[in-house]
Amino acid sequence: TAGISAPIDPAKSSFTFTGYGPGKSHDGTFTDLSGELLLDGETVVGARGKIDATSVSTGIDRLNGHLQSADFFDVAQYPEITMESTSIKDGTLTGRLTFHGVTKEISFPVTTAPRSLSADTVISMKEFGIEYTGVNDEVRIQFSLSA
């Protein structure tokens, strides 16, 4: 796809997640997010992003530490989470997500606007080798990226 690469503006971008357990949920974010949007004019035609998994932030120190541990993200072994689109077509982004040392092709609905891309979707942690008793497999992911 022809286009120009524009860096994501961290001040105008966000990435949050919500994990669920019996009768509870926890919201979190990553404070270290980088990447770029591939633009054709002002239209987003591709995206690439990287998250520093050690930058997980839930507002609860103990929970941050647990998410960084081998029970979940295992940041000592897998410090980065990366996503690279292979296509954005008809409101669907398809791409390769590398999380917890596993790379899978996934697709999910996205909304594009001039120089921005956003999504609200659910991913399975089990598909990426993370299983933890008492926590739902599915995690809600919401992001908005602007160049």
Image: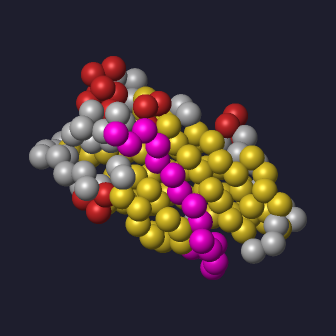
Report if residue 129 is visible in the image.
yes
Q: Nearer the viewer, residue 26 or 85?
A: 85
- On screen, 119 above or below 134? below
Q: What x and y, as percent, mark residue 93?
A: 57, 70
Q: Nearer the viewer, residue 21 or 34?
A: 34
Report if residue 29 is visible in the image.
no
Which residue sits at x=34%, y=28%? 64
Q: What x and y, as percent, mark residue 49?
A: 59, 51
- 32 horizontally vs 62: left or right: right
Residue 4 in which image quadrant: bottom right
User: Which residue occupies the extreme bottom position in the image?
Assistant: 90
Q: Is residue 83 magenta?
A: yes
Q: What x and y, as percent, mark residue 72?
A: 27, 42
How many numbered tags mark residues here? Answer: 0
Which residue sits at x=35%, y=34%? 76
Looking at the magenta stretch, what is its main secondary structure?
Answer: strand
- 70 horizontally vs 86: left or right: left
Residue 123 in which image quadrant: bottom left
Q: Nearer the viewer, residue 3 or 147?
A: 3
- On screen, 86 above or below 29? below
- 71 horizontally vs 90: left or right: left
Q: Which residues are magenta?
A: 77-92
Q: What x and y, as percent, mark residue 119?
A: 55, 58
Which residue sits at x=29%, y=62%? 127
- On screen, 135 above or below 104? above
Residue 102 in which image quadrant: bottom left
Q: Is residue 55 magenta?
A: no
Q: Nearer the viewer, residue 22 or 39?
A: 39
User: Which residue occupies the extreme right position in the image?
Assistant: 41
User: Which residue occupies the extreme front position in the image?
Assistant: 77
Q: Quadrant of the N terminus?
A: bottom right
